[in-house]
Amino acid sequence: MKKVFMVISALFALAASGAAHSYDWQPLPTTAPAPANNPTTRAKVELGKALYFDPRISSTGTVSCNSCHNVMEGGDDSRPNSMGVNGQTGGRGAPTVWNAAFHATQFWDGRASSLEAQAIGPMTNPIEMGMKNHDLVMQRVAKMAAYKTMFNAAFGNQQMTIDQAAKAIAAYERTLITPNSAYDQYVKGNKSALNKQQQKGMALFAEVGCVSCHSGAAFNGQSGLPMGTLMLMKFPTFTDNAYVKKYNLAADKGRENVTGKAADNNMFRIPTLRNIALTAPYFHTGTVRTLDEAVKVMAKTQLNKDLKKSEVADIVAFLNALTGPFPKQVMPRLPVTPGESVVVD
């Protein structure tokens, strides 16, 4: 069994020690790590990209991976709750796919140990993509001749299995990273990359204790951890405040929904703060509309601190510096089935 790490946000040793200025600020790597059994190749990425954008792997032919994790914007769908087949909405907002390769586990509750495992989960979720099983997914894919050629190029055969599909989608998602933000340039030595307010916000981000959870290159507390390592935090930690009720923060049991254990109540994977300015509304609830409000909510519910308006503005300015340049995305030409539909039975 993989070792489980649980971050309890009430423990803020770094902030208490006054070590904010000596914090190890890390730039985002320019390539994402890939498992030994799924090295990233161009052919896999091209196949994975096509599958990622293809709505025909949903029961109604209307929902693709990109529907909820839109790479043409912030990597989410800007909705409080993501919409699946037949207009159904789930109970959580979609986390961004940008820089998801740097998470040790996937989904808000960490239930998938890898990008590969995450990639195929929504396909058979009745609310999300609605396919009855993965065999039916691959039966549809196999009807499209061009996919056979792409699978052969990627894997050297035409077996066209769901495991291969998962590996291809994950390979594409590992290209969705955004290094070289203003923050990255700053920590690499370009001290003019951040303005004075952003530098002030960066120091404050550490001093108030945000780095206790949002640490490492991806600001997700998971940098360098082996794939499958579960890193969770309690959210909300401090519940005696108006925000918890106002934004319905404690209703979702988080990891407890997976394990059935009361100790996992309200335990969630730490989200990345990379490109956080582009992924409103915030939190798994999608109930907080603005970034400045999200900063105030986090300070109170996780650190039990009330920030001044100027402090919020400084931290938000720093968070805006975590937006990096996005690799160009060209919509793929998807395989077709001339003269018939693979969606209509």
Image (spheres, rainbow, N blue to C red):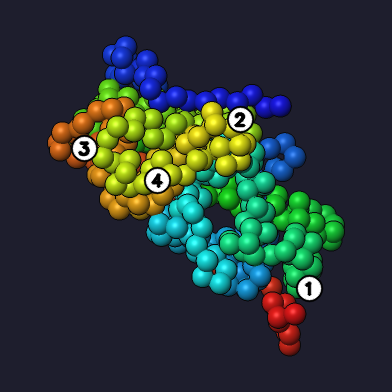
Frontmost of labels 1 and 2 is 2
In percent of the image, x 41 and y 49: which residue is there? 285
Q: Residues within 10 Å of mark 1 (few under 14, many from 20)?
A: some
In percent of the image, x 15 and y 33: which residue is there? 308
Q: Where is residue 60 drawn, in percent x and y?
A: 63, 73
Q: Where is residue 277 drawn, in percent x and y?
A: 33, 48
Q: Which mark is residue 229?
A: 2
Residue 245 figure quarter: top left
Q: Is residue 49 above or below residue 293?
A: below
Residue denoted by label 3: 312
Kind of residue indicated by mark 4: Phe
Residue denoted by label 4: 283
Q: Earlier in the sequence, mark 4 or mark 2?
A: 2
In percent of the image, x 70 and y 42: which residue is there? 39
Q: Earlier in the sequence, mark 3 or mark 4?
A: 4
Residue 51 figure quarter: bottom right
Q: Where is residue 59 drawn, in percent x and y?
A: 66, 70
Q: Using the rendered image of the protein, determine whether residue 220 is visible from the camera's viewpoint.
A: no
Kind of residue indicated by mark 1: Lys
